[in-house]
């Protein structure tokens, strides 16, 4: 179990630089999260969850896990047919990507990516058909635990950012005035934005009302 504590130097620095983020982090509190010990399982879960809600992604991932006898591994996936993988509820393209991952990587080779820089990890993963920036960034944040990853193209991050700041994260001025304040610890705000969505804060009403801004 991982934990981002409000008292940590990184969180305190972010809170001092970004008052809106500070209110969100204070509302949520210490952020506890599960950690995956399997690089391949985490990567396939990210492929499944792309463009889906967390609930839908978890349901499909659980079905794939069952097909793999309780643990999603390259060997277990290679033993499945494309139709078997699709029967879990995913589109053909995602099923093909998961098969491509199983054919191109072992657990050890994925774990070895920890020795590379963020950009080198992305470049290595891009060589697998169907893996793009979003999936690579999810791997960097949620498996490798890299501290300064900002997935600008992520729909959930965009939604929560717009709720909190009232401007789109893709706006150049917003990136200059807000996102630059997060470096070199951008992954922490990203995790808190995800949690704001998952806890229902974004759906509860305007940020000014929910957080007392």
Image (tube, helix red, strand yellow):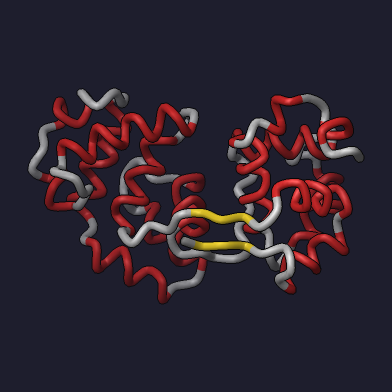
Give residue 122's position: percent from left, percent from top: 46, 58
Give residue 31's position: percent from left, percent from top: 62, 55
Q: Quadrant of residue 194?
A: top right
Front position in the image: 188 or 4 = 4
Left/right placement of residue 182 relative to residue 4 reads right
Left/right placement of residue 117 relative to residue 171 reads left
- Reply above or below: 144 against 137: below
Q: Quadrant of residue 158?
A: top right
Front position in the image: 3 or 81 = 3
Q: Quadrant of residue 77?
A: top left
The residue drawn where x is 65% and y is 31% is 200
Give the quarter of the figure containing the C terminus: top right
- Reply above or below: 115 against 40: below
Q: How many marks?
A: 0
The extreme left residue here reads 79
Front position in the image: 76 or 69 = 69
The residue drawn where x is 22% and y is 48% is 72
The residue drawn where x is 81% and y is 44% is 172
- Reply above or below: 139 against 51: below
Give residue 184's position: percent from left, percent from top: 70, 68
Left/right placement of residue 37 relative to residue 162 reads left
- Reply above or below: 34 against 60: below
The residue drawn where x is 21% and y is 61% is 106
Give residue 150's position: percent from left, percent from top: 63, 53
Front position in the image: 66 or 120 = 66
The extreme bottom residue here reads 115
């Amino acid at each position: 179990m991982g934990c981002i504590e409000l008292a940590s130097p990184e969180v305190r620095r972010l809170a001092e630089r970004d008052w809106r983020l500070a209110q969100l982090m204070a509302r949520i509190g210490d952020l506890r999260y599960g950690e995956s010990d399997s690089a391949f399982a985490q990567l396939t879960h990210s492929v499944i969850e792309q463009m889906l809600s967390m609930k839908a992604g978890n349901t499909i991932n659980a079905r794939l896990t069952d097909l793999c006898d309780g643990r999603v591994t390259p060997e277990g996936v290679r033993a499945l047919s494309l139709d078997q993988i699709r029967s879990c509820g995913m589109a053909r393209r995602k099923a093909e990507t998961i098969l491509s991952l199983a054919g191109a990587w072992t657990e050890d080779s994925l774990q070895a990516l920890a020795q590379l820089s963020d950009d080198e990890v992305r470049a290595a993963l891009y060589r697998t058909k169907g893996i793009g920036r979003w999936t690579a960034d999810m791997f960097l944040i949620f498996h490798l635990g890299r501290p300064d990853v900002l997935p600008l193209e992520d729909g959930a991050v965009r939604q929560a950012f717009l709720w909190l700041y009232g401007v789109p994260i893709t706006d150049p001025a917003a990136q200059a005035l807000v996102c630059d304040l997060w470096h070199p610890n951008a992954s922490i705000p990203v995790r808190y934005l995800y949690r704001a969505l998952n806890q229902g804060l974004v759906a509860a009403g305007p940020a000014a009302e929910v957080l007392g801004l």
